[in-house]
Image: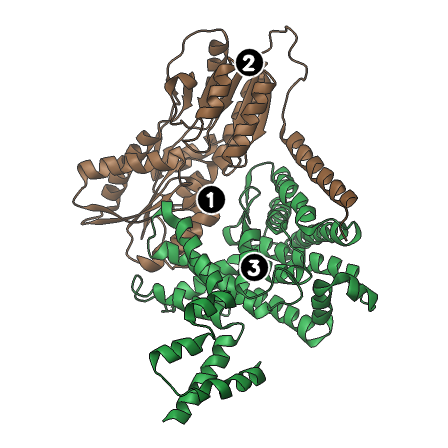
């Protein structure tokens, strides 16, 4: 049976496994950066790799850091806030020059941001924002999710017009991870336009989280189609959930893009492939390639220059007829 | 008038004391909850040459969970637990899909079979590792399997390069998302695995051996059962089940997602096993109960989507239902709430029947067990 020695062995085993996993994810360029050299050390905590968008975002940050000659310490939080907090805490302990991170959720960051402030390490948010005191971070490099929601509603207007849809519009919404900024704000922006311009004819009949994943999107959409077989429009908070939903719609014997009009946000390659096949009607781009912009900001922040509170990424919207032309330019 | 009522009540008692009664009752109750929200919830119609309906979806999306839970049942029956199944799901899906995506012809059967073989072998190796740590090294199962639970997902991400690998292979799509004889193909896979498991554990002495190892590993060893070998075997079997589930999950969306595939499935599987009436202490198990337990969990998930529970309260709703199920499963709780002797108290309250039925119902109940 179990004795103390075995337990110790086990404990060490787990600790070693944890360290190995951590090592595997560290992506430090050259080690030993400190010691008076001018190389900027950037600690970056990524949300995870939950979607193609995120992978592209990660690649962009990594390659931009390499190009800029920064020493990048990278960690993947696997969508857990506690992982991000411990990663940031370790960056503080390592005395990096600048900390950047994409917060998993919007709340609960005050304590760790105060620790960074006390250590006089500037914090730059990327992609997503937090609900904390403004003095706790320098700037946000990222998209305006609320505006993406608004743009999605505007795109839906065009899509409906093009499809010649008349009468009331029943909308199903696939939300992102509950509590995540893009999920909250995309829903908010969409509803804003809906309430302002289409209070009479548009209605969100079902809305549920699909966790930004294909499997989630597929399963939730399958249930939606059972409880509300007369859905006209699907608004998915990202392409991956939309792609999952397309499979569920096809299994129900309906035609995605015709029987159910689909508007998604992101613009990853697989999304554009689905759009070029006519299965998605419009995509609102959310540009993940913000690495170069981030490095620029890091440089300025490190030099003590003032930067804008919110540096927005450049984005555009795509209708179905633009899909084929845009597809070759999609890198992610 | 009193004689038939005695017979009915004793039959009722026998029924309510059957170990599958409460899980099945909860499953039926959950299914019925959907009807007011989705009037044609039980309707099944033909669409594009296959059956389509809520019940079909529940079985289709619940298949991976049933498989993982069946494997988990045997591990728990030996007094162990396997936390690594979710990671094994991710590894299998990642390996198989990345192999298929490298093929020139993704529809070639040989390539698909080879890819599935590679994935399943990797799964079994994970199981062998777990079994080795538990049975040979004497490490507590919860710690031993935690290693792959934590590190395995990293391995899966390493295989997929952190990307979602999308594949376009019709034959591979069959196992988790396709249809055969108008039914989801995954039903046949699940049925085969469950049938083989039941046959092996209930038609041969294997089930008895597993239970005796779970009851007391040392005593089993002393009477000549190779308890270590049995343990290694159940961990390998559990990982194989998780591997097949991994194939299904990746096939269902035609994509391998190293980060999310099978995330938290180990907890759902353990829950399914417990709802099914298998004791976490080991020593006895019920495969049928586990299948019902897994269906309860999948039905609960589907119910949340169809009745429109607000997103923020999803988990609370799930928790409340699971608490109720677990309480109903507890004989102590039932005795407290329904009276000292289970349904007898209820009956006495409803209609003051003569005292004798309880007396002669009791031995019948014993026989029926």
Please provide percent x and percent y for residue A80: 51, 36
Residues under labels 3 and 2: Cα distance? 51 Å
The residue at the point 48 percent across, 58 percent down is B61
Residue A65 got which mark? none
Quarter of the N terminus of chain B within the rendering:
bottom left
Chain painted in brown in the figure: A
- Compared with B47, A207 (above or below) is above
Q: Position of residue A283 (x, y in %)?
A: 36, 37
Task: Select label 3 or label 1 by which is in front.
Answer: 1
Task: Tell me which label, 2 or 1, sits earlier in the chain.
Answer: 2
Q: What residue sits right under mark 1 in the picture?
A: A213
The one nearer the camera, B62 or B314, is B314
**Could you tell me how far apart the alpha carbons at marks 2 and 1 are, in whole angstroms?**
34 Å
* Chain designation of label 2: A
Viewport quadrant of the C terminus of chain B: bottom right
Give the left or right position of residue A18, taking residue B2 as reference: right
Q: Are marks 2 and 1 on the same chain?
A: yes
Identify the residue at image location x=53%, y=44%: B260
Indicate the colour of chain B.
Answer: green
Q: Position of residue A122 (x, y in %)?
A: 48, 15
Residue identifier under label 3: B175
């Amino acid at each position: 049976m179990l004795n103390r020695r075995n337990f110790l062995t086990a404990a060490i085993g787990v600790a070693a496994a944890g360290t190995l996993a951590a090592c595997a994810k560290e992506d430090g360029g050259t080690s030993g950066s400190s010691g008076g050299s001018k190389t900027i050390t950037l600690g970056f905590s990524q949300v995870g790799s939950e979607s193609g968008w995120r992978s592209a975002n990660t690649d962009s940050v990594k390659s931009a850091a390499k190009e800029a000659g920064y020493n990048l310490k990278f960690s993947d939080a696997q969508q857990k806030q506690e992982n991000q907090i411990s990663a940031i805490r370790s960056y503080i302990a390592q005395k990096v020059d600048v900390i950047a991170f994409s917060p998993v959720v919007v709340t609960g960051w005050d304590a760790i941001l105060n620790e960074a402030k006390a250590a006089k390490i500037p914090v730059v948010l990327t992609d997503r924002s937090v609900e904390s005191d403004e003095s706790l971070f320098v700037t946000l490099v990222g998209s305006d999710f609320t505006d993406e929601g608004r743009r999605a509603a505007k795109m839906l207007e065009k899509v409906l017009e093009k499809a010649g849809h008349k009468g009331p519009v029943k909308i199903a919404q696939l939300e992102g991870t509950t509590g995540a900024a893009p999920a909250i704000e995309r829903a908010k922006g969409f509803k804003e336009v809906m309430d302002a311009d289409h209070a009479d004819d548009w209605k969100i009949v079902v809305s549920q989280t699909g966790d930004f994943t294909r499997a989630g999107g597929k399963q939730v959409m399958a249930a939606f189609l059972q409880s509300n077989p007369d859905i006209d429009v699907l608004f998915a908070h990202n392409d991956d959930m939309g792609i999952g939903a397309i499979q569920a719609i096809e299994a129900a014997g309906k035609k995605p893009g015709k029987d159910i009009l689909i508007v998604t946000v992101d613009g990853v390659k697989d999304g554009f492939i689905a759009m070029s096949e006519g299965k998605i009607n419009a995509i609102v781009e959310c540009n993940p390639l913000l690495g170069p912009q981030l490095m620029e900001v890091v440089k300025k922040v490190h030099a003590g220059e003032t930067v804008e509170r919110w540096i927005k990424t450049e984005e555009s919207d795509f209708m179905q007829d633009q899909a084929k032309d845009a597809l070759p330019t999609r890198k992610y | 008038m009193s004689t038939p009522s005695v017979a009915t009540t004793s039959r009722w008692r026998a029924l309510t004391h059957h170990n599958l009664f409460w899980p099945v009752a909860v499953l039926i109750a959950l299914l019925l909850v959907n009807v007011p929200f989705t009037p044609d919830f039980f309707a099944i119609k033909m669409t594009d040459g296959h059956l389509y309906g809520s019940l079909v979806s529940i079985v289709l999306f619940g298949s991976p969970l049933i498989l993982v839970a069946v494997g988990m049942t045997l591990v728990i029956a030996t007094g162990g637990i396997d936390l690594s199944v979710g990671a094994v799901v991710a590894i299998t899906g990642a390996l198989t899909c990345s192999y298929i995506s490298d093929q020139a012809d993704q529809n070639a059967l040989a390539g698909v079979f080879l890819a599935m073989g590679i994935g399943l072998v990797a799964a079994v190796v994970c199981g062998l590792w777990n079994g080795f740590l538990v049975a040979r090294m004497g490490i507590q199962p919860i710690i031993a399997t935690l290693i792959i639970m934590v590190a395995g997902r990293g391995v899966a991400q390493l295989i997929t390069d952190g990307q979602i690998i999308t594949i376009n292979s019709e034959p591979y799509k069959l196992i988790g998302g396709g249809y055969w004889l108008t039914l989801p193909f995954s039903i046949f896979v699940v049925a085969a695995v469950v049938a083989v498991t039941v046959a092996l554990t209930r038609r041969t002495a294997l089930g008895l051996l597993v239970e005796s190892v779970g009851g007391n590993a040392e005593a089993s060893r002393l009477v000549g059962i190779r308890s270590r070998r049995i343990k290694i075997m159940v961990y390998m079997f559990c990982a194989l089940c998780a591997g097949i589930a991994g194939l299904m999950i990746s096939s269902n969306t035609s994509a391998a997602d190293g980060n999310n595939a099978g995330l938290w499935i180990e907890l759902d599987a353990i829950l399914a096993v417990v709802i099914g009436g298998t004791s976490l202490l080991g020593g006895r198990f019920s495969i049928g109960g586990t299948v019902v337990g897994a269906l309860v969990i999948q039905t609960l998930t589907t119910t949340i989507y169809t009745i429109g529970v607000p997103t923020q309260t999803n988990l609370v709703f799930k928790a409340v239902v699971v608490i109720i199920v677990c309480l109903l499963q507890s004989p102590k709780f039932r005795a407290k709430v329904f009276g000292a002797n289970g349904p007898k108290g209820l009956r006495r309250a409803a209609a003051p029947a003569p005292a004798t039925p309880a007396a002669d119902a009791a031995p019948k109940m014993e026989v029926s067990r």
